[in-house]
Image (cartoon, rainbow, N blue to C red):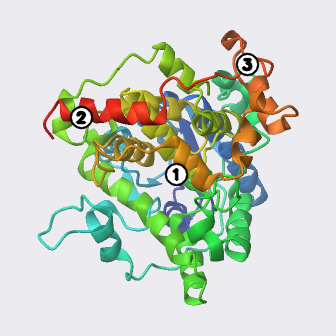
Amino acid sequence: MGAPAIWWVRRDLRLADNPALVAAAASGAVIPVFILDEVAETHGAAPKWRLGLGVAALARSLEAAGSRLILRRGRAREVLRGLLSETGAGAVHWNRLYDPDARQRDEGVKAALKEDGVRAVSHAGHVIHEPWTVETGSGGFYKVYSPFWKAVRDRDVEAPLAVPRLHAPETWPGSDDLDGWKMGAAMDRGADIVARHVVVGEDAARARLDSFIADKVARYDTARDLLAVDGTSGLSENLTHGEISARTCWQAGWAAMQAGSRGAETFLKELIWRDFAYHLVYHTPHITRRNWREEWEAFAWNEDAHLKEVRDWKRGRTGMAIVDAAMREMYVTGRMHNRARMLVASYLTKHLLSHWKIGMDWFADCLVDWDPASNAMGWQWSAGSGPDATPYFRVFNPETQAEKFDREGTYRTRWLAEISRTPPDTALSYFDAIPLSWNMTARDPYPATPIIGAAEGRKRALEAYENRAF
């Protein structure tokens, strides 16, 4: 069969619809390799732990297919060069990523391998439409979502690729032990709590998509905003780790729309919103580091992440019940309802006038569905400093949002133990997940008043905005 090929596994923990894997398998034997490299090592506590679970699930899938996953730790370039020498592999295949850290790593790897005379081939597999394939009429990139959606909504999307037949090499290289990496170490005791809520692996992701299309997509356009309703797909954690492809989700949503499902188009728009985030992070990589709109550089946000009111925000102790419930949902489940994400982001950046980077970094530590592009764009959208952002003068009122999207208070009761005489397990489990150093219990009195009220916060934010030119 000739020299084997290496499939470099990253955010594509799946066998189906995997262009890099298909290309590697076409040349003969495949050596799947996951590297805990310079990018993965920087992940926050929850994303790194969840990545480890996904890697373990992929290893099981490969074993069932007669293959195996080789694990190595170190800088990607050096590790791959070492494996090429060990195995005699003639090519390395991977699926492209678009955030600045991944691009810097990948460009260095590709240049080094080509210098060594090795075939280094990247493929399209992480998004539906690669960033450079969508252009405005003048040949530039899109800065607003609506025209971006209109530009791609009627494009043909290729059918997902089947799982290729995998041939093993004559000799397998050695592998690290996943447990020895301790990828969940930073989760501490919270791992056991969050583990109850994650849905891991390719088979589980496909089942989740099928269930959503069968039971929820018809009402998705309205149910997705109701905080206490299980009305979303839940696929964000699987998409970010590549346990299912965006193209597979698109095809399922498109078929549902053609069949007359009312909410399917809204689902497709959310998939393209993810594409839009990567479109922006590719063309304007500074979005992950600093204000996308330069005029916001002069705004006097609080940048002290240790300020008491910021600490209370992180711990769900602001006294604004809908905000606190959302923050605790994230700490217990590793995810947060999308409507709630907008509310907590608005409260931090506008009511508390704290920098969006504080929130972005906290989410990057706590979310199992953390995505570098979506997290950065979402926070800048909420703060008003990003592309296609909510206007600076739009300040979400947490109280009216709670009345509209959690009218019966079910969501707040589900996550806030202190406001109920008989709190549910979901609310109580928060205190089993948090660090002991926080010194919080379910018996603590809930704050009698918010750190800053809805009307007061809006007034203060608008005064701060008006004191500078936009």
Which residue is at the front of the view, 122 or 426? Answer: 426
Q: Give me the residue at 44% from left, 78% from top.
A: 157
- Report which residue position mark 3 lands on: 445
Say if residue 75 shows up in the picture: no
In the depicted structure, whether residue 216 falls above or below residue 406: below
- Report which residue position mark 2 lands on: 465
Q: Amino acid at mark 2?
A: Tyr
Residue 200 x %, y %: 71, 50
Which element type, helix, strand or loop, lies under badge 3? loop
Cα separation between marks 2 and 1: 53 Å
Residue 365 x %, y %: 54, 30
Which element type, helix, strand or loop, lies under badge 2? helix
Specify which label sits upstream in the sequence, 3 or 2. 3
Cα separation between marks 3 and 1: 57 Å
Circle 3 residues within 10 Å: few <14, some 14–19, many ≥20: few
Classify residue 468 by image quadrant.
top left
- Report which residue position mark 1 lands on: 6
Say if residue 127 shows up in the picture: yes
